Image (cartoon, rainbow, N blue to C red):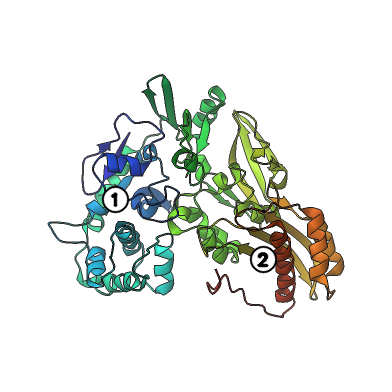
Amino acid sequence: MDFLLNQHEAAQSLGEINPNTTVLQWLRENNLVGSKEGCAAGDCGACTAVVGEVVEFEGKQTLEYKSINTCIALACSLSGKHLVTVEGLSENGQLHPVQQAMVAEHGSQCGFCTPGFVMSLFALYHNEANINLGKINNGLSGNLCRCTGYKSIISAAFLAFSDKESHEQDYYSRNKQETLETLIAMSSLDNLHCSFKDHDASFHYDSPADIDQLSDILSQNANAIIIAGGSDLSLEITQNSKQLPHIVNVQRVRQLQIIDDREFELELGAALSYHSAWESLMKYWPTLESFLHRFGSMPIRNWATIGGNIANASPIGDMPPVLIALEATLKLRKGTKVRIVKLEDYFVSYKQTLLEKGEFIQSVIIPKLSSGEQLVLHKISKRFEDDISAVCMAIKVRMDAGHATRVRVAFGGMAATPKRAIHLEKTLLQNWDETNLKELAYIALKNDFSPLSDVRASAKYRIQVSANLVQKTMLNLTGEFVPNLSEEGLII
């Protein structure tokens, strides 16, 4: 399996490799030790690198660079891509502009997190013509520093862009077309397969490019584990020390990358990253923007997929409650057979779904909002962004003359699965104008859920904060503005 590495024009081979190896492991085993392991969970950003890959834009192929967490990305997923690490930025003994800016603004102290910040700045440098504080905070999201307080790092970002026009193009800008052509030539329509033997254990990896290839592989290997971005599944490897015997990576399957914008609904391929789906999601559900910024950092959104967030069946996944509230359906495929199921019916019990052996999620179909409908979202977590929710609530409501005439509410973090709140929906329709709505909502929520107490929140807190969010939503929808302090970053 071949990829491009830094400023090398010749393809780099991964060599004989266990499919469970992360990009970070491969780097450090090959003496590229700038990327550090801080958390092995995609939380701290010390391992950040940048990946360039071929994407379709307005009918043409182009090269796009984006930051990723190498600690949770599998090395085999680099095939046909361009990996850029901190070792690959300087040229002829001269620091890259973002590196020089970090030096000038004293952006590094202990230095452990510095390579990750530099690579996030490098991605920002390549993807933005100009910047502001919002773009910088977004670009650096997911990178943690315990020394500088961030002010000097933010100053470095402004400095790098202030001098951008006076600098010569860096290696990656000068060679963008050549790199694109090389990656296109490296791309394969065949299934990429490798096997690795470690004593008596055998490990296998497949990366199909076509949905029929994927169907055939899963039909013949029903126990294989499907992975896309792996921002959740990879933790089984890095945190729980598991070795997955057969991994099937679906990132290359063209049919799982679709965006089909129809009159009344939007169909998104299951292997589409949040970054790739961003523009379409914002077009029809603009309230998702602040929510998805809190959902995960930039490197996570660059790599994590919509289908993966559903398939892992986590009760605290943030996107399933939103999609349940929007009445989304799933297109499931097994062999040549396709079936459509409601997302709210997909989750059976804790980490259990309707998927049969050899079946996979092909796409998610989301009905667009009709006239008068609104989508309201709330996320309660201890950390402002890139954190697991204590409670996630999504409400789709139709308002007529200041009164709710149709309501769908779904929650994450309140049950063993993402789940609708049926009793709460009935209560809201019958008591929208009641002054004691919060108390009525509390009673309804206790009928809908029996949440657990854990390190994130107690069961009592989850019920109470959910009732508070219901009242807050009602007040906002009826014209009495209640600021969302958490979304403004004032309370985290």
Is 163 placed above or below 414 here?
Answer: below
Q: Residue at x 19, y 65 (%)?
A: 168
Locate residue 472: give its quadrant: bottom right
Is 188 placed above or below 181 here?
Answer: above
Q: Residue furthest left?
A: 92
Q: Quadrant of the C terminus?
A: bottom right
Whether residue 202 is visible: yes
Going by the numbered disc 2, the residue's amino acid type is Val
The mark total stands at 2
Going by the numbered disc 1, the residue's amino acid type is Val
Give the residue number, with chain letter if any, for mark 2: 376
Question: Left of 103 or right of it: where is 237?
Answer: right
Residue 1 locus on image (x, y percent): 33, 33
Locate residue 195: give its quadrant: top left
Residue 100 locus on image (x, y percent): 21, 66
Q: Residue at x 68, y 60 (%)?
A: 394
Label at residue 300: none
Q: Which is more toward the observer, 480 or 128?
A: 480
Q: Secondary structure at mark 2?
A: strand
Residue 194 locus on image (x, y percent): 38, 27
Q: Residue at x 52, y 46 (%)?
A: 258
Residue 129 locus on image (x, y percent): 34, 68
Q: Residues within 10 Å of mark 1 (few under 14, many from 20)?
A: many
Q: Secondary structure at mark 1?
A: strand
Q: Residue furthest bottom?
A: 480
Give the residue number, with chain letter if any, for mark 1: 84
Q: Residue furthest top?
A: 200
Whether residue 269 is visible: no
Q: Mark 1 or mark 2: which comes first in sequence?
A: 1
Q: Which is more toward the observer, 263 or 361?
A: 361
